[in-house]
Amino acid sequence: MVKHVSIKITGRVQGVFFRAATKEQADTLGVKGFARNESDGSVYIEAESDEMTLTMFLTWCRKGPPLAQVDRVQVLPGEWQGFKHFVINRE
């Protein structure tokens, strides 16, 4: 069963290739959705996959790429959107 989660990651997560590394991890695991920087310095992610894959993805998100320092990861369930790929939003 496909699940959808919204993820907000705070800490030193901008300017450390967090979104690019997130896309790489998502593509490796088969997660669909997007990642974007927020004006408050956080990274916001929407992700869809099966529960086991999302658990692995969230485990990675709690650590992030080598230069990141993740302080907090907030995860909220959401409604399935049917994403076709994982993309980086550059808004």
Image (tube, helix red, strand yellow):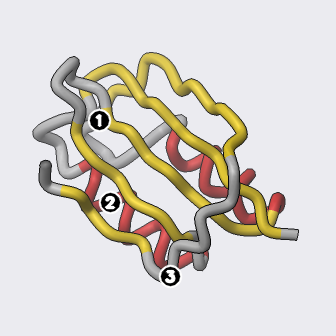
- Give the residue at x 32% y 20%: 11
Question: Seen in the image, is 52 located left or right of residue 67?
Answer: right
Query: Which of the pair 3/30 is nearer the observer?
Result: 3
Q: How far apart are marks 2 and 3 (CA)?
A: 19 Å
Image x and y of residue 17, in percent:
19, 51
Question: Dot 3 lies on which element?
Answer: loop
* Kind of residue at badge 3: Lys
- Give the residue at x 21% y 23%: 41
Counting residues from the start of the chain, the first of labels 2 and 1 encountered is: 2
Counting residues from the start of the chain, the first of labels 3 and 1 encountered is: 1
- Give the residue at x 16% y 25%: 39
Task: Determine which residue is flagged by label 1.
Answer: 68
Q: How far apart are marks 3 and 1 (CA)?
A: 27 Å
* Kind of residue at badge 2: Ala
Q: Which mark is residue 56?
A: none
Question: Dot 2 lies on which element?
Answer: helix
Q: Residue 21 carries which label?
A: 2
Image x and y of residue 54, in percent:
70, 57
Circle 2 or circle 3, nearest the eye: 3
- Give the residue at x 71% y 39%: 77
Q: Are marks 2 and 1 in contact (CB under 8 Å)?
A: yes
Counting residues from the start of the chain, the first of labels 2 and 3 encountered is: 2
Q: Residues within 10 Å of mark 3 (few under 14, many from 20)?
A: few
* Kind of residue at badge 1: Ala
Image x and y of residue 89, in percent:
23, 58
Q: How far apart are marks 2 and 1 (CA)?
A: 10 Å
User: Compared to 76, does 71 lie above or below?
Assistant: above
Question: Dot 1 lies on which element?
Answer: loop
Q: Do the residues labelled 2 and 3 touch (CB within 8 Å)?
A: no
Task: Determine which residue is flagged by label 3.
Answer: 84
Q: Do the residues labelled 3 and 1 touch (CB within 8 Å)?
A: no
